[in-house]
Image (spheres, rainbow, N blue to C red):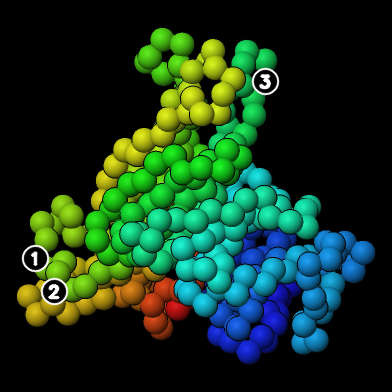
Amino acid sequence: RLFHPPSRGGPGLGVRRMEKSAHVLFQTRDPKGIVSVHSIERSSASALGPARMHTPSCCPSSSIIRQYETYSQTFCQAAPCVGNDHLLALPSGNESEVVVVDDRADTPVSRFSIEKKHGMLTSLALIACDRPGGDTERTTRPILLCGMESGTTVLFDVLQGSMKASYSLGKEPVLTLDVTKSSTSSSSSPGAQSTAFLIAAGLAGDGEEIARMDPSEAGRAVLFKAKSQHSSDSQSDSSHSWEFQKRVRLSTCHINETFSGKPGVSICRFRPDDGRLLAVGGWDYRVRLFERTQGTQMAILKGNAGSVAAMDWAPDAASSGLFASAG
């Protein structure tokens, strides 16, 4: 089956498969900054979500599940939530504001404003973290990650509505973020438990500046972990403390003595289900595959005609190995 995106008076910004493999997220840079969720299976009109949507005349109404007018004019892409099919993180008309929505509700779950010192919002990721909630139950907490023009990643607890931590990756904008679940384990601190997830970030890059960097810092993709500590005796959400731990900086485009090359990274995607492989798409028209433990490069894929603008794994990629990219 083919998905035919609507024409909206602006260029396409992103296409992304959601955790429900028959759903696709489509975003354009039209005046209304429309983000829409479509069913590839072209579900019946009776399956459409409630009210806050309209149907473009060029697109079959049965394909649209939900549509949002963000009024964003930046290149920041919306992000579905890993582990919760109903949540989306959306950019807005305010370049430093994020909106988290639930497709079952007509009003936003939360709005987050980021300090202006970090500049413009450039990327988003959202994950529903498992958190121990006592001896007999487990609950999930949506965690929002915002990549910023300043090179900083900012973490928000969506339910609590507050910023919890920030982490600087350098001075270049964080153009892309992706997340995958990690293990939840007991902390070394008595009476405390920890929750962790792994983050991949892709950065912009200037060839001349990167040529002057130490090779260990020149890679434009970074793997790092977000980890929280939570007292098992506390029922308060404020008892969470978050920290970031850098795992590895990944080697990307090589810069020669003439400073030629296109070192920036435009998109990162973990393989679904196990997250053991990471695909990194660059300005140099290439996709690089890395294993996540040590950051070892497994392959370089060529064939894109431009900077890699979109890519994704098949839902069964762990067994089929299927992967697609566009540039």
Residue 174 image offset from top left, x and y in percent: 36, 61
Q: Is residue 153 left or right of residue 316?
A: left
Label 1 with label 3: CB-CB less than 8 Å: no
Residue 234 image offset from top left, x and y in percent: 54, 17
Q: Is residue 54 left or right of residue 181?
A: right
Picture residue at 31% right of the left edge, 75% below the top:
284
Q: Whole-Å distance between the Cαs marked 1 and 3?
A: 52 Å
Q: Earlier in the sequence, mark 3 or mark 2?
A: 3
Label 1 with label 2: CB-CB less than 8 Å: yes
Residue 309 or 243: which is nearer the viewer?
243
Q: In this picture, is 164 found above or below 60?
A: above
Question: Which residue carries the number 2 mark?
Answer: 208
- Label 3: element kind: loop
Three-letter residue code for mark 2: Glu
Three-letter residue code for mark 1: Arg
Three-letter residue code for mark 3: Glu
Q: Earlier in the sequence, mark 1 or mark 3?
A: 3
Which mark, by number, is residue 137?
3
Q: Is residue 12 left or right of residue 327?
A: right
